[in-house]
Image: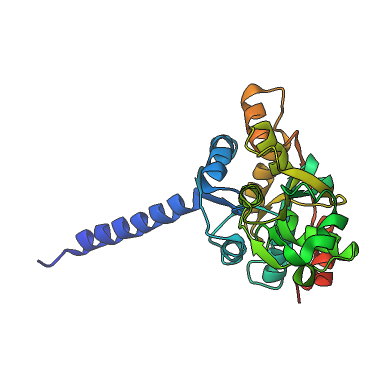
Amino acid sequence: MKLSRRSAFKVLLICVFSQLSVQVLASDVLRVSAIPDEAPTELQRKFTPLGKYLEQQTGMRVSFVPVSDYAAVVEALATGKLDLAWLGGFTFVQARIRTVGSAAGAVIPLVQREEDARFTSKFISADPSIMTLADLKAKGKNKVFSFGSPSSTSGHLMPRYYMMQQGIDADKDFKNIAFSGTHDATVAFVASGKADAGVLNASVWEKLKEEKKVDPAVHVIATTPPYFDYNWTVRGDLNPALVKKITEAFLKLDSKNPQQAEILGLQRATRFIPTKKENYDGIEQAARSAGLLK
């Protein structure tokens, strides 16, 4: 059937507006993710109330996008498939290097927890003969040591760098190195004897202890010096007005507000503070010294 000019024009308008509607809907979704440093169910539990809060503050639908590993978060930010991501210090450095000079521009760190300005990692063991790093080094040739993810700041990079400073070469001084993948898995590795010692971030360690999920035999043998770690980062070409809304939303979270206190509690935060890329220069230097960045 041949359409009249008027009918054809109406069809064209419908097609155009349909396409615009799809684009508007797509732009009304804030795509958020996080490095998978804990079990997927735990990440979703921590994010759910925060996602609802961000929806209220931005007027956008917020979608949590799970990823398979740390590298996937970096790549998704770099290729515009994510708008906002919870990164570790090392992952942020990797994302910044990956996006410097790109058409979208370098990623931008917005906020960090106040605790992230002085973050630490805990070395643990269930072996009663290992009470210090010196004990671990002395017995290391017969021991398996577990890091978290290869791209983890607190579960790999900074502990490895600290061990280097203490004269321990993780690749040479242990029988074998294992990568558990997540901080809670490292504790499980050590508790089960799959690893003789390991390292994880202090925040997850304290949370697992509070929840009584740590075998009594597992004990801390050392703590790293403090360093900058986690932050919320946006892709470089995100709308500046939206970036401002997201930043303000985090900064005004108040522990005196019951609903916001729940969000802060799940994030293991007392409050959020502004951050900047220069805070992570030390992380980049440590990564280069440890041979994890070329």
Q: Locate residue 278 relative to residue 28 in the image: left or right.
A: right
From the viewer's perspective, is residue 253 above or below residue 22? above
What residue lies at 43% left-to-right and 50% top-to-bottom?
A: 25
Give coordinates of residue 47: x percent, y percent. Answer: 57, 41
Q: Splitting the image into 4 quarters, where does residue 236 fall?
A: bottom right
Q: Can the viewer see residue 21?
A: yes
Position of residue 22 in the picture relative to residue 140 (left or right): left
Judged from this view, the residue extending furthest toward the bottom is 294
Q: Nearer the viewer, residue 41 or 282?
A: 41
Query: Closer to the camera, 63 or 94?
Result: 94
Q: Is residue 59 left or right of residue 113?
A: left
Q: In which quadrant will I find the N terminus? A: bottom left
Vertical side of 265 occupied by 80: above or below: below
For the image shown, how many numbered marks are present on the structure? 0
Expressed as whole percent of the image width and height from the top left, the position of residue 150 reads 67, 64
Q: Is residue 281 visible in this depiction of the protein?
A: no
Residue farthest along the left direction in this orientation: 1
- Residue sitting nearer the eye, 103 or 192: 192
Give the image's coloring scheme: rainbow
Q: Is residue 127 above or below residue 292?
A: above
Location of the C terminus by quadrant is bottom right
Horizontally, residue 257 falls left or right of residue 11, namely: right
Residue 291 in picture, x, y percent from top left: 78, 73
Expressed as whole percent of the image width and height from the top left, the position of residue 19 reads 37, 58
Residue positioned 75% across, 33% down in the render? 270
Q: Choose between 288 and 192: the one closer to the eye.
A: 192
Q: Residue at x 20, y 59 (%)?
A: 7
